Amino acid sequence: MSEAMDVDPPAETGKAPETVPTAAEDDEDEEQITDLLDLLSQSEDDALPPTAKIPLLTSILTESGPPDGDGEARYGPKASSVKERAVYGLARSYCATGRYDEVVALLTGDVCRGFFDNATKAKCAKVVRAVLDVVCGLAPEQLDMQADICRNIIKWCKEEKRNFLRQRVEAKLAFILYEQEKYGDALTLVDDLLVELKKLDDKQLLVETHLVESKIHHGLRGMAKAKAALTASRTCANAIYVAPTLQATIDSMSGTLHCEEGDYNTAHSYFLEAFEQLDQMDDRDRAVKALKYMMLCRILDSLTKALKLSAAGGVGAKSDRSEVDLSG
């Protein structure tokens, strides 16, 4: 029987074995945000009036570190998430109290400066667009205020060379100018923006910008250009994923242009597509509007057919054909 092989003990390296830090130790090394969470929790109390929420939310964004810290503001992942929610809450509170001038200065003033300076460009773009959506939803009639916010952000983006964000805010500003019926200014802005976007081949923003361009030309009664812009928007949309809300808007615009041409049957089909998507998303207001347009298209289509039959019958026999022609 062979003897057992001797196994040499491992050589000593003189180094202590490395210890893997536990999750608990990692948490201790991370920033302490208990005080920020407490302030945020207080501000989200529904019983608290908006005027009382503003100082709490402002203190989150302008904090100078934990009470027992070294006086440096916190911008770690958790602290940034809390501050992002504070920005949204502050925008809602300003709108609720009618302090629209404060909303204009919120994103470009000193309150959010530290947060934006320490956030990534993608995070900044997300927050700014979300705040614009919040403001537009809570104060839809304050178009001048919305336009001022966009212009301030665009100016700031140019100074900081944040072209990605600037282009998206310019698209938003173009839509606001369209809502204000300032078609000339909106069209000039859209034309310049489209030149940049086509070079970058940013299809997502091209879809939105061409859609706004179509609405502007429709407002100017330029149906041919409105259809061309809508076709360009659809072409870009076919190459990427489009959110259901945006797709419903494209379908609604298609239905509107077909109504202008008197093709009520095709318009009904587009409004039906828009209605089904909006109904699935529980967007009741826009879904009901699309449903009303569907019913109106059916009525107009039936009325047109009935009048054409009358024109081809007894009425047409005693009248000049040009007087009862319904094609135009």
Image: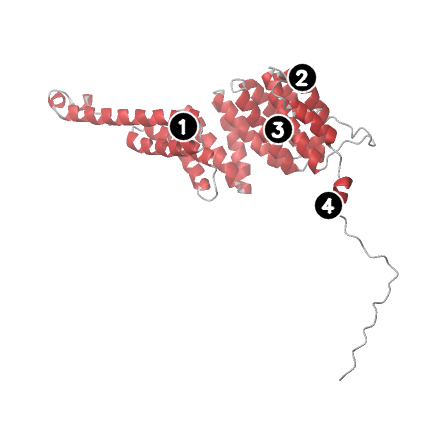
Q: Earlier in the sequence, mark 1 or mark 2?
A: 2
Q: Residue at 56% across / 33% down in the picture?
A: 168
Asked whether, in this view, residue 116 is left or right of residue 267, the answer is right
Q: Residues within 10 Å of mark 4 (few under 14, many from 20)?
A: few
Q: Position of residue 164 (x, y in %)?
A: 60, 36
Q: Earlier in the sequence, mark 4 or mark 2?
A: 4
- Between the C-alphas of marks 3 and 1, the distance is 33 Å
User: Is residue 288 at least partly visible in the picture?
Assistant: yes
Q: Please name the residue that numbered disc 3 is placed on.
A: 154
Under mark 1, the amino acid is Ala
Under mark 2, the amino acid is Ala
Q: Please name the residue that numbered disc 2 is placed on.
A: 52
Q: Residues within 10 Å of mark 3 (few under 14, many from 20)?
A: many
- SS for dot 2: helix
Badge nearest the viewer, 4 or 3: 4
Q: Please name the residue that numbered disc 4 is placed on.
A: 23
Under mark 3, the amino acid is Ile
Give the answer, above or below, for where 37 lies relative to 240: above
Q: Residues within 10 Å of mark 2 (few under 14, many from 20)?
A: few
Q: Earlier in the sequence, mark 4 or mark 3?
A: 4
- SS for dot 3: helix
User: How many numbered callouts?
Assistant: 4
